[in-house]
Image (cartoon, grey):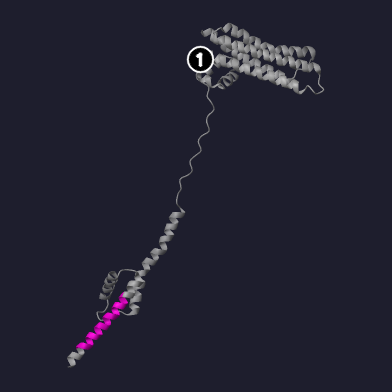
């Protein structure tokens, strides 16, 4: 009948449209990279706004895909830039500061107080502070340190003068001057021995003898100067004059501390 034919044509048309819609749905799913279920829901919602009889054309599908992909593309472009910005401006903690340089050794309070009683305060502090044991030493210990510093000075002068005589042995120099230098070297050696004896007296708490030995040590370099004045006037070397003065000041510091020690004993 005519009614049956019309119904059959309508059914074929519906199946054709349904097949076409499924193909478009698959294309939409692949283009947007979302699940088929999500694609179906999005398309159904979109077509509810259109005419009920409107078919899903390829142009309509392309328009929807472009609309859905636009935010994703913008996000993908801005994402790496933002990430790069954060990475480019990443803050790194500064390197650790180098440790501060160790401070110079500070003289103990007793060293400063003791040196205030001497004629050469700066020399006294330097000589005593050079010995680490001065930080825990009492006045007797400080006097022994001062005497030892003077003895080291006398020993160094004796060695230097002896080496000077040996070095000039093959040169054309005044024989008298050489003999005087040799005598001066011996006198500084005697000063060294006198200071060693003074230290022994301090250990035995015999401060009077210690003072006598230190006084004698200060006199030995003056013998050297007197000999030069007598045999070679005006030829006393400046180096010898400086050595004499250095030992004299160290002996003065030692005598002042020994005097302080005697007064408090």
Question: Image check: 47 left or right of 90?
Answer: left
Which residue is painted at 34% across and 70% down in the image? 32
Of residues 7 and 91, the one nearer the viewer is 7
The overriding secondary structure of the stretch rendered in magenta is helix
Is residue 2 part of the magenta span, yes or no? no
Instruction: List the single residue furthest toward the bottom.
Output: 1
Question: Image check: 159 left or right of 24?
Answer: right
Of residues 136 and 113, the one nearer the viewer is 136
Which residue is painted at 41% across and 62% down in the image? 78
Q: Is residue 158 visible to the viewer in this orientation of the structure?
A: yes
Q: Quadrant location of residue 237?
A: top right
Residue 265 vertical placement versus 72 (above, below): above
Residue 97 image position (x, y, % from top left): 49, 39
Which residue is painted at 52% across and 16% down in the image? 113
Q: Is residue 55 visible to the viewer in this orientation of the structure?
A: no
Residue 126 vertical placement versus 18 (above, below): above
The part of the chain drawn in magenta is 7-25
Residue position for label 1: 138
Residue 123 vertical placement versus 204 (above, below): below
Is residue 15 part of the magenta span, yes or no? yes
Query: Which quadrant holds the N terminus?
Result: bottom left
Instruction: List the single residue furthest toward the right.
Output: 172
């Amino acid at each position: 009948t005519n009614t049956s034919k019309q119904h059959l044509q309508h059914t074929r048309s519906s199946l054709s449209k349904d097949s076409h819609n499924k193909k478009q749905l698959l294309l939409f799913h692949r283009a947007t990279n979302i699940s088929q279920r999500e694609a179906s829901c999005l398309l159904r919602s979109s077509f509810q706004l259109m005419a009920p009889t409107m078919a899903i054309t390829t142009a309509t599908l392309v328009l929807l895909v472009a609309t859905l992909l636009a935010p994703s593309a913008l996000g993908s472009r801005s994402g790496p830039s933002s990430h790069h910005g954060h990475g480019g401006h990443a803050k790194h903690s500064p390197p650790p500061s180098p440790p501060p340089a160790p401070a110079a050794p500070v003289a103990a309070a007793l060293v400063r107080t003791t040196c205030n009683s001497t004629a050469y305060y700066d020399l006294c502090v330097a000589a005593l502070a050079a010995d680490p044991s001065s930080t825990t030493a009492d006045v007797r210990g400080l006097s022994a340190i001062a005497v030892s510093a003077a003895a080291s000075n006398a020993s160094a002068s004796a060695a230097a003068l002896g080496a000077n005589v040996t070095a000039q042995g093959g040169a054309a120099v005044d024989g008298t001057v050489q003999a005087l230098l040799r005598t001066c070297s011996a006198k500084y050696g005697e000063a060294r021995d006198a200071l060693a004896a003074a230290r022994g007296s301090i250990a035995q708490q015999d401060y009077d003898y210690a003072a006598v030995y230190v006084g004698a040590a200060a006199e030995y370099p003056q013998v050297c100067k007197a000999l030069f004045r007598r045999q070679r006037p005006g030829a006393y070397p400046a180096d010898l004059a400086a050595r004499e003065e250095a030992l004299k000041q160290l002996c003065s510091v030692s005598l002042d501390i020994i005097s302080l020690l005697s007064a408090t004993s």
